[in-house]
Image: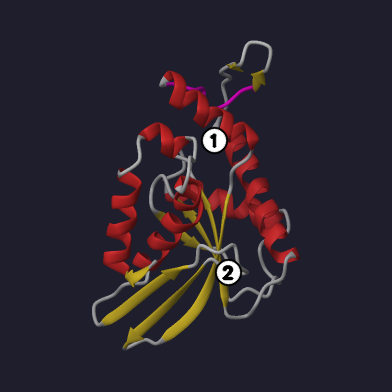
Amino acid sequence: MKGNAYAFASEVDRQIESFSRDEFLEKKGRCKRLREEILPISRFALSLKLPGCEVEVEVFEDSGPVDGRIRVSGFRVDEFDVQATFVYDYTDSLRDELLARQGAAPGFGPIYRDKQFDGIIACGQATDVEETLDILSLAILARFQNKTEKGATSNTALLISFDDVTLSQHSVWTRLLERITRQGGLSGSGFKQIFLLNCATNQLYRAA
């Protein structure tokens, strides 16, 4: 899949809209790759588009060492590969499945699959922004370490994405990045650049 930044993003949106909400939430068929790799890369490419500057984006759906490539031409010239990784664990998949099945799911609190009754048991629990940031910062660092251990190249950008509607204000992003720095940071990996993307708000931050 390949195209200029605008056309590519439009095609990604079209493909996502062709699936039902439940299919997308439960990552059925191609939805997993769309949600975790293709959509984030398309939004990343859009952020690079400027007047007088063309951006071409390509994604590889072959489980190879990189997930995409971006070429920039015009008054600025650049070309680099992209590795995309998504903050998502088993409890997140249970919440999405419960949301698809029942139309609602608690965003925080214990959740598990009850195999005896073939259902998901969830209990809502109060939390605050600081606790959410603690959990998210550790998850981002885990994805970073996983990708770093597999090897990085100096011409590859690492894109770490997540989906959190509560994280939008600049001050909250600042506190998230401060936590990541205190816990070791995202430097020294060998990647060209490292970006964080909140797919729920289309906010992109360069972290290293």
- Position in image of residue 142 (x %, y %): 70, 52
The residue positioned 36% from the left and 75% from the top of the image is 56
Segment tinted magenta in the rendering: 104-111
Q: Tell whether 154 sits left or right of 188.
A: left
- Position in image of residue 167 (x %, y %): 46, 43
Against 130, residue 124 (above or below) is above
Query: Mark 2 — residue?
Result: 66
Query: Mark 1 — residue?
Result: 129
* Along the line of sight, the residue nearer the viewer: 198 or 56: 56
Q: Tell whether 189 sits left or right of 36.
A: right
The residue positioned 32% from the left and 60% from the top of the image is 9
Which quadrant is the C terminus positioned in? bottom right
Asked if residue 107 can be seen in this view, the reply is no
* Along the line of sight, the residue nearer the viewer: 182 or 90: 90
Secondary structure of the residue carrying numbered label 2: loop
Q: Amino acid at mark 1?
A: Val
Q: Amino acid at mark 2?
A: Val
